[in-house]
Image: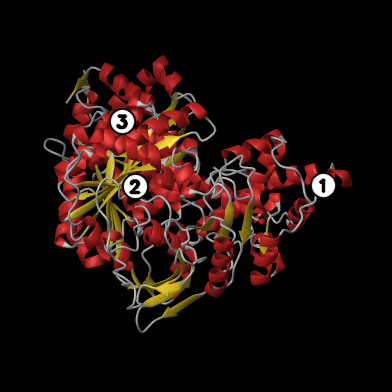
Amino acid sequence: MVKFPSDEWIEVFKDELNRNADYERAAKDWEGDFLFVILPEGELENEVKYYLDLWHGKCREAYRVDGNKNTAFTFSGSYSNWKKLIENELDPIKGFIRGLFKIKGDSFKILSYVKAAKELVNTANRIPTEF
Amino acid sequence: MDSAIEIAEKASHCGMCRIDFLKTGLCSAGVKNGFAAYWPDGRMELLLALSRNELEPTKKLVDVVKSCDMCGRCDKQCHFITHLRPSKVQEALKQFVEALDEKDFVKVPEDTVLKQLRDIVGSEWATNDPVIIRSYSRSIIPQNSSNQFYVVMPKTAEQIVKIAEIAKKNSLPLRPRGAGTFLVLALHTLLAKPVTIENGIIIDFGRMKKIEVNTENCTATIEAGVTAFELQKAAYSNNMRACVAEPAASVCANIASFGIISTWMNMYGWGSDLFIDTEYVTEDGALSSLNDSNISNPYAASHGLESLTLSPSKIVTKMTVKLFSRNDKEEAVLIPFSSLPEALAFAHELARKRLGLSVAVISRKYLSDFIAPTNSISQDFNYVAEKYFKMNYLVDIVGDADHLELIKKKAGVVIDERMAKRMILGVSKLAKMKDSEFLKILGEEPDPLKVVFDGPLREHLEKILGETKTEVASAFDKDLQGFFEKAYSKPEMTDLIWLHSFRILPSRMIRQKLFMVRGGFMQGEDETILKTHDLLSGIGEKYGLENALGFISFLEHGKLAFLEYDYYFDHNDKEAINRLNNAIGESLLAELMTKNVLPVEYVFHKGLNRKEHLFYPLPKGISKEDIPRFQDFVQKLL
C-alpha cells in the first residue's frame, strides 16, 4: 500500500502512467505541465502539491513541490474529493463541472483531452493506495 | 459561370445589400440608378433569366453591367448574411455581355403609356425595358413572366397621383413595391398570384427616402422608400428608437401590410399604435391621409372567413411614425429553457407585469442562425445546444436595467450581455466541440443549463469563447477575413440591444433556405399558444418541411399573443414548394378552426387598421360545416 499524499505515491504514479498505453494514445499530442493541488481537509492538515510534466503521452517528471511553481495547468480539489477521484468514485470532468475541482489554464485544451484525463484517474486507481 | 448561376439561384433577396449595416457604403450603381437591375439582387435575376434564355438582351444590359465598379461592397454585405458572393454574378454578366454582338440586342420602343409616365417622373425614372422589368422577378413580378410591365420610380406623392391616373385611363393594374422582402417569400408559394399583378405598372419607392425627425413630438415623418434600418439610424442619432421589423424592408409598406410584427410589440404595440398619420393614394387616384376628417372610419376592420385581403387597397406614400425614447440604462438578457411551456410561462409573466420592452420566446434554431457566421456552424451549434445543453428555447429580453435585475434574480440561469457577446464571437468553438467526450459528460448532468451558464463552468466557458475577433472572422472566405475581423471589432456587432433594435441578425434565417411564416395573433392564454404551436409543428412534420418556432411575443401586457412559426423550403425545389403549399393550406384551415386564433394571413394589409377593431373579438373558430365555404373562398382567391 502506498500512502496518499506522499512522495512515494507520485513516483509510483509516474511509473504506472508511463506503462499505461491507453493514456499514451489519448495524450499523444498533449503538451503541458500540471500542478495537482490537494487542499487540506480532515486528516490532511497542509496543502500538498504534485508537479507533473506531461508530454506526448508520457510523464517526463513527477514530484512533490514545496512552495510555488508555475505550470501551464493547475488542477485542485479537497482531500476528500481527491480520495473519491483515486478510488474511481468521481469522474474528473464531472468533478470539474460540478465545482469540486478547479482548473487553471486553458480549459478548452483540457476539455479536448477528456479521455486522457480519465486515463490519469484510471492509472491512479491501479495504485494500491492508503488514505 | 455555373457557380455564378448557383449563387443567383440560391439568392434569397433579403435586401441587406441595400442598407449600410456594415458601414462599407452602399452599391454606387444601385444608389445612382435606382432600379433593381443595378443592385446585386436584381443582377442575380438577370443572370438567371439570361442563362435560361428567358430574356433577350437590350442595350440597358450593357449599361447595367458597366455601372458596376466591382468595389466588392456587396460581397461583404451578402457574405455576412447569406455567405454568397454577388460579385461573381456580376463577373458572369460581364462575360456574357462581352460575348454579345450588336445584332444580339433587341430594341425596346417607347409606347404611349411609357411616354406619359416619363413626362411625370423624368425619362430615366420610368421604363418598359425587359432588362429592368426582369430584375424585379421574385420581388413583385412572378418569375418567367413575359407580360407587359412598366416600372416607375416617382419622387413625390403628387407624381404617384398622376401615375394612378394613367393606370386608370389605360385600365392597367397598378402595384406599389416597398422593398419586396415579403414578396420574395410569397412569390414562390400559392400566394404568388393574389399578391402580385399579371401586367401593369409597378411603383418602386427607391427615390422616396426623406426622413424628418421631430424630437419635440418624438416622431419621424418618412417617405415610402425609407427602410427600417434607415429610420432606426435616424431615431438612434436622436437617442430614440423606432419599432421596426426587417432592416431592409420599407417601413411604410411593412406597417401597412403586417403592422410591424416584432418582439418590441410587447411594449410599443402594433399597427396603428405605431403611427400618427399616413398619407396615401386611394384606388381612385386621390391623395388623402388618415387624419382627413372627411374620410370614413379608416381604422375599421372587417371580420369573418372572407375578410382575407391579399392586395393593398391604398398606396402609402408617407407616414408619421412614433419614436420611443431610449433609456441609457437598458440591458439585454437571454434566459435559456429546456421546455417551451416553461419559457412561455416565464415570458408571459414578464408581459403581464410590464417588465421588459422587447420580450419574446425564441427557439434554439433562431439563436443558432442569428449568432453563427455560417450555416454549418449554426447547425452544429444548434445540435450542441439541443443535445448537450438542453437549451431549446430562450426568453429574449431588452429592458430597463432595474427591471432586468429583477428578471435575472427570478430566472437564476441567464445569458447576460457579456456571455452573449462571447457567444457571438466564439460560437464556432462551441460548434467544434460537437460530440466531444466533454459534451457527452455534460449532457449527462441533470441540469446542464445551470452547469454551463450558472455553475463553475461559466467562468471557463467565458474564457473558452474569448473575445477575439479572429475566430469568428475565420469562418468567412479568406479574402474577407481581415474585413470581418475589423467589422466584429465594432461594438454594435456584438451589442445585443443594437442588434435587436436594427434586427441585423434575423436576416440570416434565410441563409440556407427561405421560409414561410405561419401562426398569427391569438388570445394570451398559454394553452391556446401551445396548442397552435403544436398544431403548426405537426403539419410541418407531416409535409416533411424543416420547421421551427420563430418567436412568441405579446400585446396589451400579455392579453394577446403573436406566434410566428416558420416552414423552411428550398425555393429551387418544385416538389418542396408543393409540400409547402399543402402545408400552408392545411395550417391555415387548422388555425381558422382554433378558437381565439387569427391567422397571420388575416392580418395582411390590415396594418393601418386599429388593433382594437381587428382583434376584438378574436374569431370563435369555424366548424367542419364551414370547410367547403372556406375551400370555395380560397379557390376564388387564388
Q: Residue at x 64, y 43 (%)?
A: B146
Q: Nearer the viewer, residue B367 or A6?
A: B367
Which callout, 3 or 2, points to the residue nearer the camera?
2
Query: Relative to B155, is B532 above or below?
Result: above
Q: Quadrant of the N terminus of chain B?
A: top right
Q: Which residue is mark 1?
A: B105
Amino acid carrying label 2: it is Glu
- Measure the C-alpha gap from mark 3 to mark 1: 49 Å
Residue matched to label 3: B539
N-terminal label among 1 and 2: 1
Between the C-alphas of marks 3 and 2, the distance is: 17 Å
Mark 1–mark 2 Cα distance, whole angstroms, equals 43 Å
Front-most of residues B140 and B2: B140
Q: Point out residue B120 in the picture as x, y percentages from the top left corner.
A: 64, 71
Residue B126 visible in the displayed image:
yes
Q: Amino acid at mark 3?
A: Ile
Give the structural element (helix, strand or loop) at label 3: helix
Based on the displayed image, in which of its 4 quarters is residue B624 positioned?
A: top left
Q: Residue B266 or B281: which is nearer the viewer? A: B281
Chain of residue at mark 1: B
**Quadrant of the rendered structure where residue B477 is?**
top right
Report the side of A28 relative to B605 (left or right): right
**Residue with the mark numbered 2:** B601
